[in-house]
Amino acid sequence: MLLAILLILALSSAILIYFSLLPVVFKRYEETQTQQAAVAKVRLENMFYMVAQNKLRIIFGLGPVAAGVAFFLIFESKIAIIIGVLLGFILPAIMISQAEKMRRRKFQGQLIDALNSLSQALKAGLSFLQAMELLVEEMPPPISQEFAMLVKQNKMGIPFEKAIEDLNKKMNLEDLNFMTTAILVARETGGNLTELFLHLSDSIRQKNRIFEQVKTLTVQAKLQGIIMSVLPIVFGILVYKMNADFFDIMLQSNIGKILLVYCLVSWIVGTVLLMRLSRVEV
């Protein structure tokens, strides 16, 4: 009788604790998702994607739940639920990061044409601000959007030096850094911007050509690294499919577990080294 009473009291206490902590957990979860939505809104606005914060809150709030349910329905496993929830948490941030990288890469690809456009406009007798306005009209996004923002900031009274430095920090590109530094130096010393832009575009074009050559030469090394990294996993899966009991001796003995851990660590270290050795900085 006493044991039953103690069990009932323990169960009641557990239920009370659960329901008292549940609102705290939900509130913390809502605050986290709201903060992530606010950060995502700023990052999207920097790419000129206007999305309401309420929609982002729904995506960040329901995304993990929806991903967890979808993974459970597909794989019918509790582990799949955990994986789906984790993916739901990190996938929106990954997608935004990839969009930023793609936009930055596209901006860099348009930089040579932008320099040539500025040079031709200055040759025609336009001022530097007029040349930038012409660039905004002729060039496609994203470079037209970024320079349109720069022109707008300048017209609102923000110093040109500050506006172009903000653009440089936002895009974080080496070629754009060369361009902004050259423009600021030329404006202070009275240099010839027309010739400067032509030389700068030629330098960037040569650099891109060398980069593409190096990238082509390192493709084989990268491919070999990928194959060597995937080969142990494929081999293990094939062996397990042919003989499911093959790894029992490794899993049931302490020495086997130590060897498996050593193999895993060695595989991770080898993969990282292969990827780093096949990477060439230009």
Image (cartoon, rainbow, N blue to C red):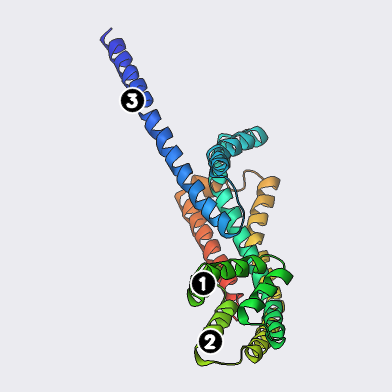
The secondary structure type at the circle numbered 1 is helix
* 224 w.r.t. 27: above or below: below
- Camera-side residue of 136 and 263: 136
Q: Tell me how far mark 3 sits from mark 1, CA to CA.
A: 55 Å
- Say whether disc 3 or disc 1 marks the residue closer to the N-terminus: 3
Estimate how packed mark 1 is, as few (under 14), some (14 to 19) or many (20 or more) residues with alpha carbons within 10 Å.
Answer: some
Residue extending farthest to the left is: 2
- Camera-side residue of 263 and 32: 32
* 64 w.r.t. 230: above or below: above
Q: Disc 1 designates what residue?
A: 163
Amino acid at circle 2: Arg
- Say whether disc 3 or disc 2 marks the residue closer to the N-terminus: 3
Image location (x, y in percent) of residue 102: 65, 63
Image location (x, y in percent) of residue 81: 57, 37
Q: Nearer the viewer, mark 3 or mark 2?
A: 2
Q: Is residue 220 left or right of 172 when viewed as pictured?
A: right
> What residue is shown at x 69% (from left), y 51% (from top)?
238
Amino acid at circle 3: Ile
The secondary structure type at the circle numbered 3 is helix
Q: Tell me how far mark 1 sits from mark 2, CA to CA.
A: 14 Å
Image location (x, y in percent) of residue 207: 66, 84
In this view of the protein, can residue 47 be seen by the observer?
yes
Q: Is mark 3 in CB contact (under 8 Å) with mark 1? A: no
> What residue is shown at x 56% (from left), y 72% (from top)?
276
